[in-house]
Image: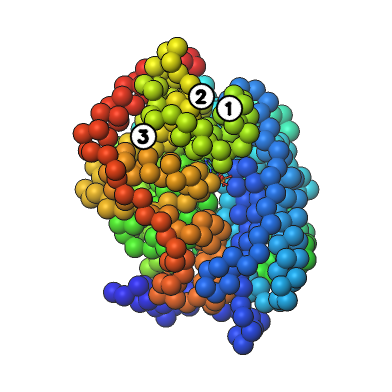
């Protein structure tokens, strides 16, 4: 079947072109990109080019070691300010806001928000995906009968990472949350649900939805039915009469997500929603099985399209929804998640003061020839895929009197590249196939040295697009499909192809495997630090 046939079968459930959309004038799509460290709003034209962008960082809150929070109201206000800022730029170019056909949302995943359904007020700071406060709770859950069978249903292993453990922690530790639960007023959501709810105006309109790529990160959704699973909820002892869960709707939908109630785009419909890593896969046009992308942001996430059926990993990977664009167009992915990537670079900036901004990491690393025998296991919040070691902590091995900052800089950037290699090895075992090229994006991929190191370590070419806002592009594509801006994957074939950079391996396979063996040894030695 052709790609177009996959995307365009006649079906009443297909997203439809909005009647109000102008067809003669140039059409644009907006994308809200609510990430871990910043919010952005981008406006794309039909060729997938960015015509306007406004970005704002927001406060990172670390109340205790291992804890990481965001102010839910600041997430909303930063997004709204970004919309206003980007539209101002857009109009300064002579366009009009009415040319924006729809808006898509992409967001940090797993981060958990709880609010009172009657007032629309958040009951606690958002607990961020990196947060490990639920470690003891997870340890207890792992001892419960049936713990080993959860992954078959929801695709994720028990850890502090998915939203489930964060919600349980809030219920156990925050009286206001428990109280709202007992009164049946508690609303729970990942950031997409919170954004859609608040951007629509909160309780007045009560748009309370999430898409499967986000819902699949909670541990409450059944990966096969794409709906909440009564047995999973029961296992977690969540009473559905007491906590409200957002309705799971398609990633591209002309009606389900409502419209913006505020900002200069008031009235513009929200028509797409994808968790950030799924959005990046879509933005890289990873529509067909066998395609993969790796996004080097705060964390690093490799998604590999496995087709219409989920593949449950036997080698430490997650199974997740890649995107759900309607009947016959639901795709699944195997995912390798690395908790710490760009955040290790920020750590060298903020905590060690080695450099004054992340973009100078490469220059520091280039002051030396190699890592000087140092290996840095950047396990600030344990190690995620494929190791899943909760009690590992950041550990630098091999320091001598010879060690310079440059060696630590190299060891830092190599940590992400080695974890990517470990994930690719697991993917090869789970899928029976070896990737031939890796598409990359995210902040850290700006550094040529990092991408060259990555190619050296995995032994295949690394392909970097010129336009790196692929996460936002993915959200725009979801919304654009629902709005009829693009009607098939084929319509996107020329989008973001020009100016790609290819990094090819420059070291021998023996050299690469020796370096990787040292990394694996260091991983084993980093265990057990936080117990
Ligand atoms: P997110 O969407 O998770 O907020 P981004 O994709 O914006 O993340 O990437 C930001 C991260 O990338 C930061 O942690 C920063 O340290 C890192 N980063 C950005 N530019 C560079 C660079 N040139 N070299 C190394 N790291 C970088």
Quadrant in the rendering for residue 343? top right
Quadrant where the N terminus is found in the figure: bottom left
Neighbours of disc 3 within 10 Å: few (<14), some (14-19), many (20+): many
**Which residue has dot 2 on it?**
405
Which label was assigned to residue 110? none
Pinpoint residue 40: horizontal percent, then vertical percent. 65, 54
Q: Nearer the viewer, mark 3 or mark 2?
A: 2
- Is the C-beta of the residue carrying label 2 under 8 Å from the nearest atom of ligand 1? no
Q: Residue at x 73, y 50 (%)?
A: 78
**Which residue has dot 1 on it?**
354
Asked if one can make out residue 147 in the rendered structure from this viewpoint, the answer is no
Relative to 264, say whether 460 is above or below. above
**Which residue has dot 3 on it?**
418
Q: Are marks 2 and 1 in contact (CB under 8 Å)?
A: yes
Q: Residue at x 63, y 29 (%)?
A: 350
Secondary-structure class at tag 2: helix
Pinpoint residue 174: horizontal percent, then vertical percent. 69, 29
> Which badge, 3 or 1, comes first in the chain's sequence?
1
């Amino acid at each position: 079947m052709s790609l177009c046939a996959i995307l365009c079968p006649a079906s009443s459930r297909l997203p439809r072109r909005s009647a109000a959309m102008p067809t003669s004038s140039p059409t644009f799509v907006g994308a809200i990109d609510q990430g871990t460290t910043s919010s952005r709003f981008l406006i794309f034209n039909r060729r997938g080019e960015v015509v306007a962008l406004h970005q704002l960082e927001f406060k990172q809150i670390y109340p205790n070691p291992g804890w990481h929070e965001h102010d839910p109201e600041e997430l909303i206000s930063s997004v709204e300010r970004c919309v206003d800022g980007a539209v101002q730029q857009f109009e300064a170019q002579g366009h009009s806001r009415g040319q924006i056909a729809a808006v898509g949302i992409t967001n940090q995943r797993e981060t958990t928000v709880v609010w009172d359904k009657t007032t629309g007020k958040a009951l606690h700071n958002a607990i961020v995906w990196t947060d490990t406060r639920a470690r003891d709770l997870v340890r207890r859950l792992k001892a419960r009968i049936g713990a080993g069978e959860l992954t078959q249903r929801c695709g994720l292993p028990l850890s502090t990472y998915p939203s489930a453990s964060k919600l349980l922690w809030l219920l156990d530790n925050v009286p206001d949350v428990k109280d709202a639960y007992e009164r049946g007023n508690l609303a729970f959501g990942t950031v997409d649900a919170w954004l859609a709810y608040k951007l629509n105006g909160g309780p007045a309109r009560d748009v309370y939805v999430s898409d499967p790529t986000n819902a699949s990160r909670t541990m409450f959704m059944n990966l096969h039915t794409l709906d909440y699973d009564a047995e999973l909820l029961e296992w977690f002892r969540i009473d559905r009469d007491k906590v409200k869960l957002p309705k799971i709707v398609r990633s591209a939908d002309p009606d389900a997500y409502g419209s913006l109630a505020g900002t200069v785009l008031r009235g513009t419909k929200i028509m797409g929603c994808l968790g950030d890593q799924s959005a990046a896969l879509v933005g890289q046009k990873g529509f067909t099985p066998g395609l993969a992308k790796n996004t080097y942001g705060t964390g690093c996430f490799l998604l590999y399209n496995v087709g219409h059926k989920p593949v449950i990993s036997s080698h430490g990977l997650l199974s997740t929804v890649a995107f759900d664009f309607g009947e016959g167009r639901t795709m699944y992915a195997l995912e390798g998640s690395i908790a710490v990537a760009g955040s290790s670079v920020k750590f060298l900036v903020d905590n060690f003061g080695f450099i004054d901004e992340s973009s100078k990491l490469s220059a520091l690393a280039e002051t030396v020839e190699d890592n000087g025998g140092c290996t840095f296991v950047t396990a600030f919040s344990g190690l995620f895929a494929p190791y899943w070691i909760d009690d590992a902590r950041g550990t630098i091995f091999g320091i001598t009197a010879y060690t310079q900052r440059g060696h630590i800089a190299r060891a830092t950037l190599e940590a992400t590249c080695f974890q990517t290699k470990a994930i690719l090895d697991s993917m090869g075992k789970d899928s029976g196939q070896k990737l031939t090229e890796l598409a990359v994006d995210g902040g850290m991929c700006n550094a040529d040295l990092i991408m060259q190191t990555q190619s050296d370590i995995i032994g295949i070419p690394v392909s970097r697009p010129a336009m790196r806002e692929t996460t936002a592009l993915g959200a725009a594509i979801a919304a654009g499909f629902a709005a009829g801006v693009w009607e098939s994957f084929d319509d996107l074939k020329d989008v973001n192809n020009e100016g790609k950079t290819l990094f090819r391996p420059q070291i021998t396979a023996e050299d690469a495997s020796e370096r990787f063996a040292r990394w694996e040894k260091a991983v084993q030695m980093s265990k057990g630090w936080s117990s």
